[in-house]
Image (tube, rainbow, N blue to C red):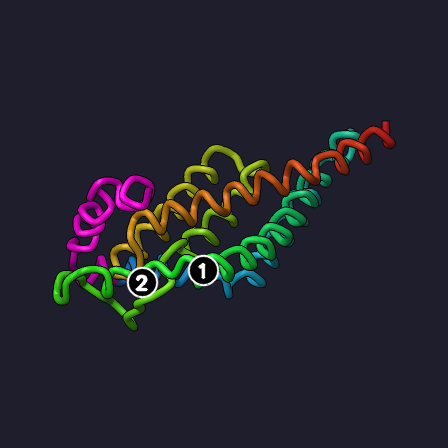
Amino acid sequence: MKAILYDWGGLNVWLFHVINNVRSEYWDRIMLLGTELGEHTWFPLYLALIALGALIFVARMPTQSSAQYQVQAARWIMVIAVFCIAYLLDGVLINQLKPLLDFPRPPLALPSGTVHIIGAPEYHHSLPSGHSSFAMLSVASLWPVLNRWWRAAGVFFVLWVGVSRISLGAHFPADVLAGFLLSLIIVLLVYTALQPLIHRNNSRRT
């Protein structure tokens, strides 16, 4: 089962080497920045920025249509609630899954000298990628209130963080994909669970 779901018949390792072997000083700096931005410790700052963005957006809306104003305000409240709740759930799951699965990271799983490592090497708890999960969680939570340009920027950010984890020698592509899927599922479930509250609130106003 692992050979199919994780190893992908050798494609997982092959794709890792394709990405990890791309090297230059400028490229490594970009990858380090991508990993830094995907740190879950930035959650308080990202939450503050989302709250500020919500305040600015709602404050700029014309107040002639009270119903539309309330709908947009409710959408932003939903985004903030989903981001917070999904972050807590995601953290609990990842902290449980990493030691439970205990997949080896590339420096331990692959022959010595075949992995380019930037930063401190890590050897255990490879699946799933926490950085990739947090990046996806952030963008997926914001998705309903983003226009197409911000959505494109969000997709770029998620891919940047994911590729950076492979480029720096910290994760295999399967770890990154697992992180993406885990947080995406969590966000969708939280949105689904909270949606009735918003509908109930809107129906009371009408």
The residue under the point 47% across, 40% down is: 150
Foreground pick, 8 / 161: 8
The three-letter amino acid code for the residue at tag 2 is Leu
Secondary element at tag 1: helix
Which of the two discs, 1 and 2, labels the residue nearer the N terminus? Answer: 2
Q: Which mark is residue 142?
A: none
Amino acid at circle 1: Leu
| Quadrant including the C terminus | top right
**Quarter residue 149 falls in:** top left
**Residue at the image position 50 percent from the left and 62 percent from the top:** 95
Residue picked out by circle 1: 100
Q: Residue furthest top?
A: 206
Please state the extent of the stretch shown in magenta in the rendering. 1-28
Q: Report the residue marked by disc 2.
A: 32
**Could you classify mark 1 by the number of other residues whose Cα lies within 10 Å: few (under 14), some (14-19), or many (20 or more)?**
few
Q: Is residue 29 magenta?
A: no
